[in-house]
Image (cartoon, rainbow, N blue to C red):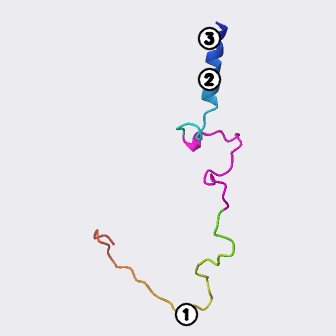
Amino acid sequence: MIKKQQEEINKFKAIINKDSHNSNKPLSSDSPFKKRTKSMRKKNGKKPGGQKGHKGRSFKKVSNPDKIEKVSLPEKCDCGKA
């Protein structure tokens, strides 16, 4: 009888300990009181970003641009609606 009760206790503990990380439950079902671990994106231990010394490429916002290009949209789309 004690063995059967212990099995039931273990079964219920397993159910209680499940969350979105170790089952197919949605993230919204996780307890708000449980401490969350680090981001799921960072799994390989690498820091984000490029290599040291690499200049990189991006467009900077300037107050006086060299060229302004106006793009107009058609009045109706392919489906016929405005």
Q: Amino acid at mark 3?
A: Lys
Question: Which of the 4 image quadrants contains residue 25?
Answer: top right
Q: Amino acid at mark 2?
A: Phe
- The CA span between labels 1 and 2 is 67 Å
- In this picture, which residue range is highlighted in magenta? 26-47
Q: Residue at x 54, y 41 (%)?
A: 26
- Earlier in the chain: of badge 3 and badge 2, it is 3
Rendering coords of residue 22 (x, y %): 58, 37
Which of the image's four quarters has the C terminus? bottom left
Q: Which residue is mark 1?
A: 66
Q: How many badges with numbers are in the image?
A: 3
Q: Amino acid at mark 1?
A: Asp
- Earlier in the chain: of badge 1 and badge 3, it is 3
Q: Specify the label residue 10 is tagged with.
A: none
Whether the magenta-drawn stretch holds residue 58 is answered as no
Rendering coords of residue 15 (x, y %): 60, 28
**What SS does tag 2 mark?**
helix
Question: Which of the 4 image quadrants contains residue 10?
Answer: top right
